[in-house]
Image: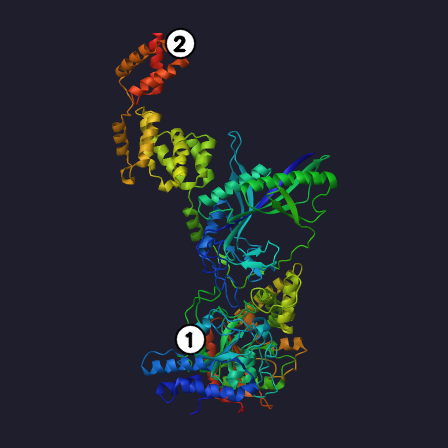
Amino acid sequence: MDYKVVIGLEVHVQLLTNTKLFSGCINKFNPDNPNVQTDPVTIGLPGTLPVMNRKAFRLALETAIALNCTIARFTKWDRKQYYYPDLPKGYQISQYDMPFSEHGWLEIPTTDDTVEPRQIRILRAHLEEDAGKNMHDETGGGGDSHVDLNRAGTPLIEIVSQPDITSAAEARAYLEELKLLLSYIGVSDCNMQEGSLRCDANINLHVLKDGETIPTPIVEVKNVNSFRNVELACEYEIIRQQKEFEETGKRLGEVEKETRGWDAVRGTTFAQRGKEDASDYRYFPDPDLVPVVVSDEILNDAQASLCELPAARRQRFLKEYSLTPYDANVIIEKLGAFADYFETVAKGCDDGKQAANWVTQDVTREMNDRGLSIEEFPIKADVLAALLAKVIKGDLTIKSAREVFMELLEVPATECTSAKIDQIIDEKGLGAVQDTGQITEVINAVVSRNEKAASDIREGKLQAAGPMIGQVMKELKGADPKTVRQMIIDHIQGN
Amino acid sequence: MSLVGATAAELLSFMKKGETTAVEVMQAHLEQISQTDDKVEAYVQIDTETALKKAADVDARRQAGESVGPLGGLPIAIKDVLCTKGVATTCSSKMLENFIPPYDATVIKKLSEADGIMIGKVNMDEFAMGSSTENSAFKKTRNPWNLECTPGGSSGGSAAAVAAMTAPMSLGSDTGGSIRQPAHFCGVVGMKPTYGRVSRYGLVAFASSLDQVGPLANDVHGAALLLEAISGHDQLDSTSVPKDVPSYTSNLEEPLKGLKIGIVKEHYVDGLDGEVELTVREAYKVYESLGAELIDISLPNSKYCVAAYYIIAPAEASSNLARYDGIHYGHRTENFENMVEMYSRSRGEGFGTEVKRRIMLGTYTLSAGYIDAYYLKALKVRRLIRNDFDDAFKKVDVIASPTSPNTAFKLGGMINDPMSMYLEDIYTISANLAGLPGISVPAGISKEGLPIGLQLVGAPFEEGKLLRAARMFEKETGWTAKRPEIN
C-alpha cells in the first residue's frame, strides 16, 4: 500500500508569568496543595471580572514573532462555553475568529548535511486561559472526584501547525524544536511532566490507489505527554490506520473525527469518543474584556527584545565555527547561556572545533557530575579560552590541559583566572618540552634500556614504541606524546 | 426637622450643624423600616448593629474634627446584586441563597470610603431579570404609593426603599432600564450612568455589555452626590473608562442656558398611556418656559431596540449564568445519577421561570447556525442605534421622553405576559444598547395617585449636563418633594 502520512500538531504551552492570564493570582505549579493558588477571579466568583495580564500578552507576542507569524493589530477575546467541573465560569476565555497571530512557520533541523531544514507551517497561535484539573478517586472506593483550580486561569498559548508533518520522527522533531525555541526565548519552561507543554496530534493517511489520493479519516490523539510518546503514538496510528483502511476502505468524511487516547504502558492508542455530536461552544466576544490593539511601538519592542533564535544560531555556528551539525545541535539544545559560553570560548581560542569538543565533553561532564548550570560553572569562558589557546599554540598538550582544567575546578572562584593557568603549569611542570636536545637525551637512555622493543621497531612493529613513549613521558612532563613517538621511531630506524 | 423623608443634602447639613448625628439618622431610618417594611417588603437583609456602629464611628470622627467623607454617615440601601464582603449577596435567587462574598464590589468600597453606610440589602428581580420585582425567589416588593402595585424592576427594592423613606438614597443596577423604570414607578430620581463610568467589579453580571450600577435618591442632588462617590476608573474592570470624574454636585444649581431638548418622533406610539404622555408633554412646556428649545429629532432604528436587547441581553446572560452549576456553589439538587443530571437538575431547581426563559433564549441565539441570524445581527442593529444617537447629539443636548409607557401596574398584572412586560423598557433600553447615560426624574402623579417619570438621555459622559437639566426641572416643579402616605 502506497501512502503519505499527514500529521498536524496542536500544542498548548503554559507561559512563564508570575500571575494568571486574567487576574493577579499567583501562577505556579503546585502539585501538593490543591486550590491554594486561587482568587475570586480564578474561581469565577459572582461579580468578578477578568483583566488581561500584559506580561502574558507580551510573552505570547514574542512567541508568535519567533514563529514567524503575522501579528494581528486588533485582537479580541471570546468565550467558549461548555460545562465541566474544572471550568469555574462555565466558559473558557479564548480566541476564536480573530487570534492575535497567524500564518507562521517553524524550521526543523535535519542531521543530514545534504538535506535543507524543513519548514512546518503554523496555522495560528492564540492565547487562552487554562482550566483546572479534576482528580478522580481511582481506588474505586468512594468514587469521589476532586476539583483543583490551581491551574485554572493560567496563560496558555495554543500553537496549531498545518498538516505539514510527514512522519512520526518529524512530529517528534517538530515538538523538540518548538520546545527548544520556547525555552530559548524564555517564554515557557516547557515542562511536559508538569503539563506546561501538552500536545494533541491529528493524524491521517493519504493513500495512493489507482491514481487517486484517498484521505483516511482524521484521528486526534489527545494529551501525549513526552516526545517519545508522540513519536510512538504517531507510529502506532499510522500502522493502525493502514490496517483499518485495508479492512474498511473508509475515507475522510465518511465517519466522524475520532478522538483517541495514548496508553503508554501498552503502547497503543484507544478510542475515547466516537460518534458524539459535534460540540457547540457558542463562541461570542467576551463583553468583560476590551479588544487589544497592538501598536507599532509594542510590536517593535517585542521584536527587539528577542534574542537570536536557535535555528538561526545553529546555522551561524555551522558556518562561523565550522561545526558539525551534530555538535551545533548539542550546543544549541543546551540553551542560550551555554551557547554564549561556547561562543566566548570559540572566539577566545580561535578554534571552534576545539571549543566544541571541550564544552560538549569536559564542561558538560563536569556540569552534570557537579549538578551545576553553565552560569554556575567555576571555569569562566574566557579562562577556558585561554587554556585552549595554549593547546592550539602547541604550548600545552591536551592531556596536560585536562590536568590544568581539573585543577582549575578545585581552586576558589576568585582565583580561577588565566594567571592561575600559568601557575598550575609551572607548579606541575606541564609546559610542553620544546628543547629537543633534552628529549633526545632521554630517548637515547630509554631506547638503550629496551633492546627487544627497539629490534621489533626495526622490523617494522611500530606499536612496540608504546611502552617506551610512556617511559619518556614519565621523565619529561609536558612533552607531546606524538612528537616523542616519532622521535623514538626515527632514532631506532636511524633516520 | 424630620429625618425620615429628608434629602441627602438636608441630612448632611443637619449633621454638620450638630442638629443631629449619624446614629440618630440611622436610627430614624431603621425605625422607618420596622414601621413600613412589612408592607413594602423592600429589604432582604439588615444588620442594625453594624450600621449603627459605623454611624457612631462617623459621628466620633466628625466630633473630633477629623475629615468625614462626602456621604458622611448617610444610610444607603444596596441592591442585593452587589457583592458585600461577609454579607450574603443573593441576587434574589435560590442559586445564591447562601453566597457570602469574600470581597466588596468596587462601588461598595467607594461608598464606604465616602462614609456612606449600608443600611441593608434590598430585593430585586432574580439576577436583575424583570420589570416588577416579582421574579424574586424570596419576596415580592410593593410600591409604597400603592401596595397593590409593583415598584417596577429589577431595582424595585432600591426604588421602593427610597420612596418608603427608609433611606434617602440607594444603589441599583440598570441593564435595560432597571433603575429608571422603578424610579418612575416609585416617584424617585434614578440614574443609569454612561457604560464604563462606574466599575462593574462585584456587580453580579446579568448582561455584561449593558449592566451599569447607578444611584437612586429622593432628589437630584442626592443622585449627583452618590454618583460622584461611586464613579471612576477601576483597574479591576477593564471596561471602566480612565476618565476624571467631574464634581456633579458643585455646579448642579447652575441652570443650563440655551438647553436644546430633543423630542423623538418615534416615541409617541400606540401603547403609551395617555396620562403619561400628557405629563411628559407638560414637562416639555416647563422646560420651554425655562428658556429651553425643543427640537424634533428622529431615532429611526429605535423600533428595533427591544428586539436587539432581547437577543443581546439573554445571550450574555446565558453565558454569565453558566457558573451557577451546583458544583462550585449555588443550589445543588439532592437527586441525581450522573454529572449531566446533576447540572440540569440543579439549574432546573435553582433558577426561576424568567431566568430560565432568558437562558434558553440566549443559548438558542448563540448556537451554531443561529448566531449570524440573531446575535451578530443584533450587534449590527446596536451599532445603528448608537449612530442614531451620535447624529442626534450633534443637534441637541439631551433627549427627553417618558421613562416607561405606563404607571406602576398591579402585582401579578403581567406575570403571564412576558412580551408586554418586555415593552415596559421600550424607552429605556436604547440608552443601554448605546451605552449612554439616562436619568428618570419625577414629573407628575396620575389620577390614581401613581408617580410618573420623565426620562432624559445624554451623550456619553454627559452625566453632569443631565443632572443639571433634571435639577432645573426639579427646582421649577418640586415633584421630587412628594412623598407617599405610607405610615
Instruction: Check residue A456 in the rendering and tell me which mark sits there, or answer none.
Output: 2
Residue A176 drawn above or below residue B362: above
Quadrant hosting residue A321 = top left
Question: Could you tell me if residue B179 is visible in this image?
Answer: yes
Cβ atoms at labels 2 and 1 below 8 Å apart: no
Q: Where is residue A383 in the image (x, y as percent from the top left)?
A: 31, 35
The residue type indicated by label 2 comes to: Asp
The residue type indicated by label 1 comes to: Ser
| Left or right of A476 on screen, residue A200 | right
Q: Which one is nearer the viewer's eye here, A337 or B474? A: A337
| Left or right of B381 on screen, residue B226 | left
- In the displayed image of the protein, which residue is found farthest to the front? A141
Question: Could you tell me if residue B400 is visible in this image?
Answer: no
Q: Nearer the viewer, mark 2 or mark 1?
A: 2
Q: Mark 1 lies on which chain?
A: B
**Residue at the image point whose x is 38% and y is 29% from the top:** A354
Quadrant hosting residue B157 = bottom right
Q: Mark 2 lies on which chain?
A: A
Residue A492 drawn above or below residue B157: above
Q: How far apart are marks 2 and 1 (CA)?
A: 104 Å
Residue B241 drawn above or below residue A383: below
| Left or right of B310 on screen, residue B47 | left
SS for dot 1: helix
Q: Position of residue A122 (x, y in %)?
A: 55, 45
Q: Which one is nearer the viewer's eye here, B75 or A194? A: A194
Quadrant hosting residue A161 = top right
Q: Name the residue under label 1.
A: B112
Instruction: Check residue A452 in the rendering and tell me which mark sits there, or answer none.
Output: none
> Which quarter of the image is occupied by the N terminus of chain B?
bottom left
Q: Where is residue A375 in the image (x, y as percent from the top left)?
A: 36, 42
